[in-house]
Image (spheres, rainbow, N blue to C red):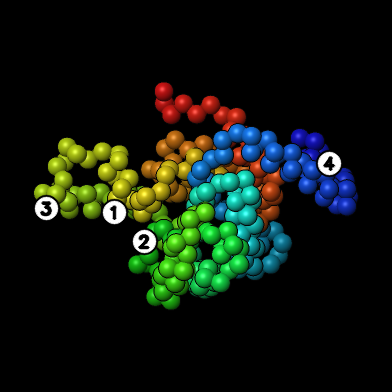
């Protein structure tokens, strides 16, 4: 609260050091408690930020991508092991073709860079795409294969990028796979449960997110990890994604640690 009241009238040369002191305090508090294992993030507000600044939408997406790289560093610093980013939904294919093409080019570039990205290598970050990859252009699919292959043995942290992803579609596809197994006799319908469904989702092998954060001021999940987020703690931030600060992220983690998670008990 103190930092917020300073932000309007205090010069940057004073505010900067104040923020760094507060960040250090928050990190100390966070590391004394159990750190969430898996954080999901809906990166909303890139286009609205660009419109606010009077710049092309594609620059908003570029700034969002840079912010995502910063956030990954913040998460690694406090010991979060899994970060899942909502980068491009199945509904996003309905956007203007020029914008789609730019985002596809950006994704291709970033996946190809995974093999040479110093931070990815130094922090041993495993990169994986989650979604209906067959919907993506061939060049993007090939880049994804390269990025995943180059990082598949890294074991310090996992970065999952949801592309061509939709939670409803994911569940429908999982049900289809299970029904195929039932019809083939491999599975008895009575054996179908939440565990089996989870094993047939795109996120197979991943623990459910402890936290889902959405920026941009909207209060909804927008088809992101619908099944997996059943017991996740939800945080909605009234800030465009390119403007999210380290302090904002750390506050979410600290507030998560203060919640009493009963899981229905």
Of residues 133 and 70, the one nearer the viewer is: 70
Residue at image location 31% in from the left, 48% down from the top = 199
Residue identified by numbered label 3: 184
C-alpha separation, residue under disc 1 versus residue under disc 3: 17 Å
Q: Earlier in the sequence, mark 3 or mark 2?
A: 2
Nearest-to-viewer mark from 3 and 2: 3
Residue identified by numbered label 4: 6
Residue identified by numbered label 1: 173
Q: Earlier in the sequence, mark 1 or mark 3?
A: 1
Secondary structure category for the residue under label 3: loop
Label 2 crowd bin: few (<14), some (14–19), many (20+), radius 10 Å: some
Label 4 crowd bin: few (<14), some (14–19), many (20+), radius 10 Å: some
Nearest-to-viewer mark from 4 and 3: 3
Image quadrant in which the C terminus is located: top left
Label 3 crowd bin: few (<14), some (14–19), many (20+), radius 10 Å: few
C-alpha separation, residue under disc 2 versus residue under disc 4: 45 Å
Q: Earlier in the sequence, mark 4 or mark 1?
A: 4
């Amino acid at each position: 609260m103190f930092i917020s009241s300073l932000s309007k009238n205090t010069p940057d040369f004073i505010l900067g050091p104040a923020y760094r002191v507060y960040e250090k305090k928050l990190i100390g508090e966070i590391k004394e408690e159990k750190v969430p294992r898996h954080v999901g993030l809906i990166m909303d507000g890139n286009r609205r930020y660009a419109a606010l600044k009077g710049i092309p939408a594609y620059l908003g997406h570029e700034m969002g991508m840079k912010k995502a790289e910063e956030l990954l560093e913040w998460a690694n610093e406090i010991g979060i092991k899994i970060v899942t980013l909502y980068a491009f939904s199945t509904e996003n294919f309905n956007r203007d073709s020029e914008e789609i093409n730019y985002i596809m080019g950006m994704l291709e570039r970033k996946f190809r860079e995974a093999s040479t990205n110093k931070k990815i290598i130094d922090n041993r970050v495993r990169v994986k795409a989650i979604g209906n990859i067959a919907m993506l252009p061939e060049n993007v699919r090939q880049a994804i294969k390269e990025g995943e292959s180059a990082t598949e043995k890294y074991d310090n942290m996992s970065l999952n990028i949801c592309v061509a992803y939709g939670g409803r579609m994911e569940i429908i596809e999982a049900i289809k796979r299970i029904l195929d197994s039932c019809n083939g006799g491999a599975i008895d319908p009575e054996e179908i449960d939440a565990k089996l469904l989870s094993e047939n989702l795109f996120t197979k092998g991943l623990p459910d997110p402890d936290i889902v954060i959405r920026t941009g001021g909207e209060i909804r999940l927008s088809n992101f990890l619908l099944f997996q987020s059943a017991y996740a703690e939800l945080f909605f931030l009234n800030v465009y994604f390119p403007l999210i600060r380290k302090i904002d992220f750390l506050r979410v983690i600290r507030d998560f640690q203060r919640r009493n998670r009963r899981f229905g008990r």
